[in-house]
Image (spheres, grey):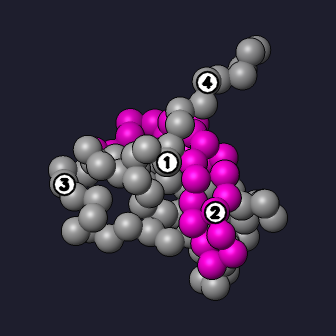
């Protein structure tokens, strides 16, 4: 089953390498998170997973309000780790 990607015109703004810095630490397993992203339409709180991080930022895979998948580097303070659901 293929997941539809967020169209370029609606993707979250992503930090560049000069902003997120190094070293980039990949997650051993994706960590459940919620994150604030910024798009052309404004800010949105989305569910997703953290794929990697630096001291300043987190690489997230998120699902938008239409169920489409997107990726972005966002500032670390825009991300909150979600606790696993009870019974999961």
Cα separation, mark 2 vs mark 4, equals 23 Å
**Outermost residue, left direction?**
23
The residue positioned 40% from the left and 53% from the top of the image is: 75
Q: Is residue 27 above or below residue 7?
A: above
Q: Which residues are magenta?
A: 25-50
Q: Earlier in the sequence, mark 2 or mark 1?
A: 2
Q: Earlier in the sequence, mark 4 or mark 3?
A: 3
* Numbered disc 3: secondary structure: loop
**Outermost residue, top direction?**
87
The residue positioned 57% from the left and 39% from the top of the image is: 33
Q: Residues within 10 Å of mark 4 (few under 14, many from 20)?
A: few
Cα separation, mark 2 vs mark 1, equals 11 Å
Q: Could you say which quadrant of the image residue 25 lies in?
A: top left
**Is residue 46 covered in magenta?**
yes
Is the magenta region chiefly helix, strand or loop? strand
Label 2 with label 1: CB-CB less than 8 Å: no
Q: Residues within 10 Å of mark 3 (few under 14, many from 20)?
A: few
Q: Is residue 84 above or below residue 56?
A: above
x, y percentage for residue 29? 46, 36
Cα separation, mark 3 vs mark 1, equals 18 Å
Cα separation, mark 1 vs mark 4, equals 16 Å
Check disc 4 and report the residue beneath it: 83
Q: Residues within 10 Å of mark 1 (few under 14, many from 20)?
A: few
Q: Could you say which quadrant of the image residue 74 lies in?
A: bottom left
Check disc 2 and report the residue beneath it: 43
Cα separation, mark 4 vs mark 3, equals 27 Å
Check disc 1 and report the residue beneath it: 78
Query: Which mark lies nearer to you, 3 or 2?
Result: 2
Check disc 3 and report the residue beneath it: 22
């Amino acid at each position: 089953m293929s997941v539809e990607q967020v169209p370029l015109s609606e993707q979250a703004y992503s930090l560049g390498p000069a902003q997120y810095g190094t070293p980039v630490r990949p997650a051993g397993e994706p960590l459940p998170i919620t994150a604030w992203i910024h798009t052309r339409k404004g800010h949105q709180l989305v569910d997703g997973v953290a794929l990697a991080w630096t001291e300043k930022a987190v690489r997230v895979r998120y699902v938008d309000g239409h169920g489409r998948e997107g990726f972005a580097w966002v500032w670390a303070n825009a991300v909150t780790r979600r606790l696993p659901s009870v019974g999961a």
